Amino acid sequence: MKNENKHSKLVFILLTFICISLAPTILAGEVNATSNSFEYKVLDLVNQERSKNGVAPLKMDNTLFNAAKTRSKEIKIKFSHIRPDGSYYYSVSSKVRGENIAWGKKTPKGVMKIWMNSPMHKSNILNPRFKSIGIGYNNKGSGYWVQLFGDKKAVNKK
């Protein structure tokens, strides 16, 4: 009986430790798998391009990330910098200072290739004024991609 009690206490302590360790990650809405998502793969490719051009890396911003996810659903409905409700793309968040959109590519490398081959999209990616980014990918249909750029330091994400 005493051994069972010790074992139960040990299991309780171990589970408590695990829960306390994971709580900040879970509460922040982040999971380790997120860093392997297509959005974070695009972020890595963006920062590789910025590094090649002597520009500081961008960091994912939680607000821009959520706004980009919203926009990736919207551009499936209406592929435009004008939102389905008729407002401009930047109305999705007060943090937005620039936007890149794309469709038809199923991989991060594919979408980055078309953006880097477009002078306007490339200028957003390499703009040193931008400090943060939100990236959204909607894999419904042809694949819809959004990058939202911000000029303030990122909050909450990797």
Image (spheres, rainbow, N blue to C red):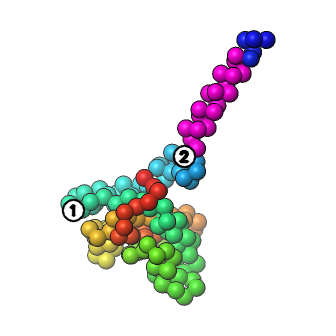
Residue 32 colored in magenta in the image: no
From the image, tell me which residue sits under label 1. Answer: 53
Residue 102's quadrant in the figure? bottom left
Say few, some or many: other residues with alpha carbon within 10 Å of mark 2 (under 14 / 14 to 19 / 20 or more).
Answer: few
Q: Specify start and end residues of the magenta stretch as a single range.
A: 6-24
Q: In this view, does 76 lie above or below 39?
A: below
Q: x, y (%) of residue 45?
A: 35, 57
Question: Looking at the image, can residue 22 be seen?
Answer: yes
* SS class, disc 2: helix
From the image, tell me which residue sits under label 2. Answer: 24
**Point 54% across, 52% down: residue:** 28
* Residue found at the very far right of the displayed protein: 1
Q: Is residue 47 above or below residue 94?
A: above
Q: In this view, does 57 lie above or below 93?
A: above
**Point 65% across, 21% down: residue:** 10
In-image side of 122 versus 157 (left or right): left
Distance Cα–Cα, label 1 vs label 2: 35 Å
In-image side of 49 versus 26 (left or right): left
Q: x, y (%) of residue 110?
A: 40, 62
The three-letter amino acid code for the residue at tag 2 is: Pro
Quarter placement of the N terminus = top right
Q: x, y (%) of residue 80?
A: 48, 82
